[in-house]
């Protein structure tokens, strides 16, 4: 019988992958089981993980949306004296339909909670959520926030026997030293817009804070929480957010452009121009004017692409509500210490434009 088992869903994602690195030494866990959504995700995780991680994580492929198949894992894994389940898998899309978001974030959570029950008495459940949502007194900005909160309410009401603990983190970026991260979500699509399309301006409130956190700090805080859960007894929820030290949107954009230009310089590519932030009302007037007057001198991305991306970010550029930090062992590192690494790693992973365009003098 395994003494103390840790089962992690979503281990191929950003937070799950960071946690796997943090758990490479493994104590106090006798066994670490990583649940992957498919063979491709498992193989990609295995390919990028160091030997210490591959040696510690027992990979299992399972469609967590399939309730019976998920429940069958209990018998396949065999007995353990105690198990801690970390549910980090989620539909993280900010634009998913309510049906899709509820399926990925509520029904899957229910399936994993049923699995936790089947793993035996004393099993504990740790739910990875977002610092950008709450179960009460919150106006949800998208279906992701709404369904993550719904799943937490489900756990509290229907699975109190699992003594659920919630670990909420804000927007995760790359490792504070290397910039590495398993998935490019959060601020990364905006970074791609700046790098590939070089708009001269974007809408947003310069004084709104964008709470970002490096993945290695998040993983270390989650690992510390799991050690407390493994020790038994009550454990308080944790909010891994940067709080008052989070950058203002104006600071983040300026810092990201500077970091991007340092990365581009190393790649012998021309720098992107400075980028101005304007209020949304002025932005909408300018967009209408450019269309009406058919202005061609101001380079702008495809209208549909730009409007879709700005629509995704607008709720956060106008409303910066986020839960305050709580229960962390260490404060989040200052963002200027890790932004360069995060941007540099992302830049190095992006496919470059054609050589022909570069030979013609294009910016890349």
Image (cartoon, rainbow, N blue to C red):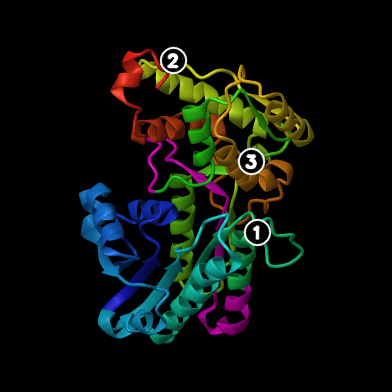
Find residue 133 and name its label: 1
Q: Gap between marks 3 and 2, in whole Å?
A: 28 Å
Q: Residue at x 25, y 60 (%)?
A: 56
Find residue 210 and name its label: 3
**Region rendered in magenta:** 153-182
Q: Which element is circle 2 on? A: loop
Where is mark 2, residue-wise?
270
Find residue 291 and name its label: none
Asked if the magenta segment contains residue 172, the reply would be yes
The front one of 236 and 257 is 257
Circles 3 and 2: CB distance less than 8 Å?
A: no
Q: Residue at x 41, y 23 (%)?
A: 263
Categorize mark 1 by other alpha carbons within 10 Å: few (<14), some (14-19), many (20+). many
Circles 3 and 1: CB distance less than 8 Å?
A: no
Q: Is residue 242 visible?
A: no
Q: Which element is circle 3 on? A: loop
Q: Gap between marks 2 and 1, in whole Å?
A: 39 Å
């Amino acid at each position: 019988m395994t003494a103390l088992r840790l089962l992690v869903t979503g281990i191929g994602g950003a937070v799950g992958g960071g946690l796997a690195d943090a758990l490479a030494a493994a104590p106090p866990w006798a066994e670490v089981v990583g649940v992957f959504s498919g063979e491709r995700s498992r193989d990609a995780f295995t390919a990028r993980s160091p030997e210490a991680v591959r040696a510690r994580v027992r990979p299992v492929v399972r469609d967590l949306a399939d309730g019976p198949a998920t429940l069958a894992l209990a018998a396949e894994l065999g007995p353990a004296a105690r198990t801690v389940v970390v549910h980090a898998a989620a539909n993280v899309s900010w634009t998913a339909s309510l049906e899709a978001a509820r399926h990925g974030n509520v029904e899957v959570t229910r399936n994993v909670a049923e699995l936790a029950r089947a793993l035996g008495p004393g099993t504990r459940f740790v739910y990875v959520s977002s610092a950008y949502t709450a179960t009460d007194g919150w106006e949800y900005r998208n279906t992701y926030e709404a369904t993550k909160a719904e799943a937490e309410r489900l756990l509290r009401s229907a699975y109190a026997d699992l003594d659920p603990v919630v670990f909420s983190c804000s927007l995760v970026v790359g490792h504070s030293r290397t910039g590495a991260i398993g998935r490019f979500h959060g601020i990364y699509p905006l970074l791609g817009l700046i790098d590939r399309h070089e708009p001269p301006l974007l809408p947003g409130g310069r004084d709104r804070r964008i709470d970002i956190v490096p993945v290695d700090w998040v993983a270390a805080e989650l690992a510390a929480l799991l050690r407390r859960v493994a020790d038994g007894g009550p454990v308080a929820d944790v909010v891994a957010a940067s709080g008052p030290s989070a950058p203002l949107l104006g600071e983040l954009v300026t810092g990201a452009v500077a970091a991007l230009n340092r990365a581009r310089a190393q790649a012998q590519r021309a720098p992107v121009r400075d980028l101005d932030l304007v209020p949304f009302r002025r932005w909408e007037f300018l967009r209408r004017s450019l269309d009406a007057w058919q202005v061609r001198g101001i380079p702008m991305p495809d209208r549909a692409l730009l409007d879709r991306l700005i629509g995704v970010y607008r709720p956060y550029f106008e409303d910066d509500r986020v839960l305050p930090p709580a229960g962390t062992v260490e404060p989040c590192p200052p963002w200027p210490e890790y932004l360069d690494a995060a941007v540099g790693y992302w830049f190095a992973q992006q496919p470059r434009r054609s050589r022909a365009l570069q030979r013609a003098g294009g910016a890349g």
